[in-house]
């Protein structure tokens, strides 16, 4: 297995695992961990896109990285009752 294959399969596995975790909605902490894993997946896809010269894949996953970071913030950092600033 080549380096590119390892990167792609890591990204794929992380994406599948994160989707299962988030879909189960097992509470704030577990869902937040799912978003952390989604972030790893999207960053890994950015690396794969870079190595394979696929700017569309890199762009899509750059946006997904931002969305996933928002998910991490919402589920792991932001506490209910706080006012959003």
Image (spheres, rainbow, N blue to C red):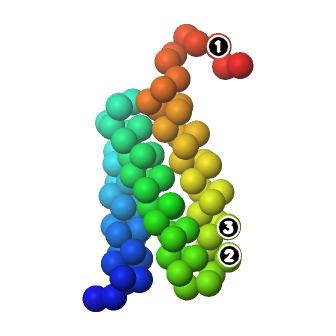
Q: Which residue is mark 1?
A: 83
Residue 62 at least partly seen? yes
List x then y, in percent, for residue 33. 36, 41
Q: Are marks 2 and 3 in contact (CB under 8 Å)?
A: yes
Q: Which residue is located at x 65 percent, y 57 percent? A: 63
List x then y, in percent, for residue 20. 35, 54
Tag on residue 59?
Answer: 3
Q: Is residue 30 above or below residue 3?
A: above
Q: Which residue is mark 2?
A: 56
Q: Which residue is located at x 62 percent, y 49 percent? A: 66
Q: Is residue 12 above or below residue 25?
A: below
Tag on residue 21?
Answer: none
Residue 22 at least partly seen? no
**Of marks 3 and 1, which one's residue comes earlier in the chain?**
3
Dot 2: what SS? helix
Nearer to us of marks 3 and 1 is 3
Mark 1 Cα-neighbour bin, 10 Å: few <14, some 14–19, many ≥20: few
């Amino acid at each position: 297995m080549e380096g590119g294959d390892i990167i792609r399969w890591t990204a794929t596995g992380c994406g599948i695992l994160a989707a299962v975790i988030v879909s189960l909605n097992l509470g704030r902490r577990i869902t937040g961990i799912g978003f952390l894993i989604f972030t790893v997946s999207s960053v890994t896809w950015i690396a794969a896109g870079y190595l394979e010269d696929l700017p569309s894949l890199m762009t899509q996953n750059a946006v997904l990285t931002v969305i996933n970071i928002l998910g991490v913030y919402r589920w792991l950092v932001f506490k209910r009752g706080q006012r959003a600033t």
